Image (cartoon, grey):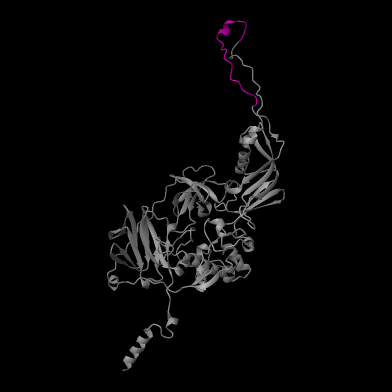
Amino acid sequence: MKKILILLVCCLLLLPGLPGQSEMKDEPAPLIRVCLKRLALTDRADLILDGSYTLESSGYSLYFKEGSEMTLQLHDNIIYLYTPDMRMRCGSEIHLVRHPGSRNGGIRFSKGGSLYPGDLAFTVSGGMLLPVLTLSVEEYLRGVLPYEMSNDFPLEALKAQALCARTYALSHVNPSKPYDVVDTTNDQVYRGTGNHPRCDQAITGTAGLVVTHKGQLINCYYSASNGGQTETVDHVWAGVEDNGLYRMVDDPYDLANPESIVKRAYLNKNADHLPEAFTQILFNYMASSLYRSGYDDTLSSFRVDSIESVALSGTIHPEPSRFYTKLDIRFKWSGRKPVVPVMTTPSLASGSYGEDEDVLFFVTSTPAPVQPESVLGPFEPAPETAVLSLPLFPDVVRALSLSIYGADNELITCREENGRFVLESRRFGHGVGMSQRGAQWMAAHEHFTFDQIIAFYYPGAQIMEGASGPSRLSTLEPGLAMTPGPSASPTPRPTLMPVTTGSLPEGSYLASVEGIEDDSSLNLRTEPSQASDILMRLYKHQQLIVLETCEDPAWVHVKTDSIEGYVMVSFLEKVE
C-alpha cells in the first residue's frame, strides 16, 4: 500500500498545471544558426571533436566518441569523410549532432583552437564547404562578447553589449533562410568560446534580457566608435526603417575615451612637409588652369608656397550632423613657364681645318643636334591665391592618412594651432546605436549601469525578459553509443607558401603572420585598405617579406615567392 501511494504522488507531480509546476519549468533558450565564414574554408575541413557526436548523412548515422579527429574533403561537390581507418562518401550534406552528455563540448578546427559548441552542418555552396553551427543564443554570446568588446571591459559595459548582441541575434532568426547570421562584422564577430570569465558573468547576469521598441525586438545596431556623434539608420542604410528609435545626438563619452581611434594630419602654413599624395591632388585640380595661364602643366613645375586657410563644409545631412564632405583650402603657389630656347650655332664635324680645301671635302655639313639651354623658367609666384573645394572622400582622407577603416564616413574636424592646421578623423564603424568605446567610458568613469547605457543609446526602448535556459539537444539512440566509430586523425593544413630570403631588398625585412587565431586567416589585399579586394587568405606562421610601410602606417606592402599585396602590420611579427 505504501508503494502505491508513493507511485500516485509521483504521477501527480508529473501532471501539467499543478501548483508549483510552472515555477520548475525551464524554458529552452532560443537557437541560432551561425555561418562560419571567418574560417574561410574551401574544399577541406579538419575537425577535432571535444565531445561525443553523431554524424548523420544520406540516411545513416555514425557515432564518434570525444577526442575523435576527422577530415572532410570535397570532391566533385561530394563530401568525403577521412579517418586513418576508413574513407566514406557522405553526399552533399552532413550533420554532426552533439549528444546531451556533451553539453559543454563542441568542435575545434585546430588543436588548441577555439571551441565551437553545438551542432555543425556542412553543405556544398559554390564548390566550397559551407559550415553552419547551431547553438543556443546564450552559448553563442560567449563567442561574441570577448571579440566585440573585450574581457577587460567594465562589467556594466559588457552587460550592455550582451543585451545588444542577444537582441541583434534574435531579431535575425529566420527559419526560411539557410542560416541566421554570419560570424564576421557583417553581423557580429563570433570566434567560438574560450576562457573569458567577465564576459560569461555579463551573459549570465543578463540572461534572457532583450531590447524592444513598441513591443518588438529591435536590430540593436552598435559599432566600435561613433566619433562623438551617433548616426541615424536612414543616413547609413537607404530604405531601412527604424520606427523613429535612432536619433542623432552628441556622444561626449565616446569623445572623452582616449581609446577611441583618432587619426591626425598636419598642414603647415608654410607648406613644409606636405604629403606627396595631397600635393598631387591639389595639382590635379589646378592642372587645367595652369595650362590656360601659360604655366607648364606637369607636377614637377608646381609648388605650394603657403597655406592661408583650411575649413570644412558640405554637410549632406541636416543639423546637428557634423559629417562634412568637403575640404576648402586657400593657398599660394608658384609655377614655371616655358621660355623661348636659345639655339646653339651648328658646327661642322670635328677635325683639322687649315687652308687646304681638300680637307673640307671630307667634312659633313649636317649640323649637330640642337640643344636648348633652357626649356622652363624658374618658379614664379602666381599673382592670385588658389581657392579649392575638394571632396574629402575618398582621395583626400586617404592622401592625408585619415581613413580609419575604409568606409568613408569619418567625422573630420579642423583647427588652427601653432602655425599649422590640424585635421582629425574619428568614427570606427557605422555609428548607429551604442558606441562600444562610449559604453566603456560610461561604465568605467561615469558609473553608469547597463540599463542606463541602453537608455542613452536607444532612447525610448524598453528592456524585457526573453526566453532563457539550456538549449534542447538531440537525443542519442542507445544502440548507437554501443557501436562507436573509429578514432580519426586529420591531415595537416595546407602547406605555407615558400619565401626566398637569400638577399632581401634594401629596407625590407622578414615577418611572420602571428596575430591571428590558429583557426583563422589574414586577408592579403590588392590595396592598403580594408575596402580593397582580397587576393587570398594567409594562414598563421606564414612568412612574408615586408617591402615597405605604406602612407597609412597601419599597412605594409608584402610578398612571397608567388604573390604580392598588402596586409595590416599589427598581425605580423618581425623574424629576427
333 in relation to 29, above or below: above
Q: Is residue 190 left or right of residue 8?
A: right
Position of the N terminus, as image quadrant, is bottom left
Q: Is residue 489 visible?
A: no
Q: Position of residue 531 (x, y in %)?
A: 51, 50
Q: Position of residue 272 (x, y in %)?
A: 67, 43
- The residue closer to the viewer here, 547 or 76, is 76
570 in relation to 270, above or below: below
> Does the magenta run of residues contain 371?
yes
Main SS of the magenta part reads loop
Q: Is residue 484 visible?
A: yes
- Point out the stretch of residues depicted in magenta: 353-374
Q: Position of residue 191 (x, y in %)?
A: 46, 62
Q: Residue furthest bottom?
A: 1
Q: Position of residue 501 (x, y in %)?
A: 46, 45
- The residue closer to the viewer here, 238 or 445, is 238
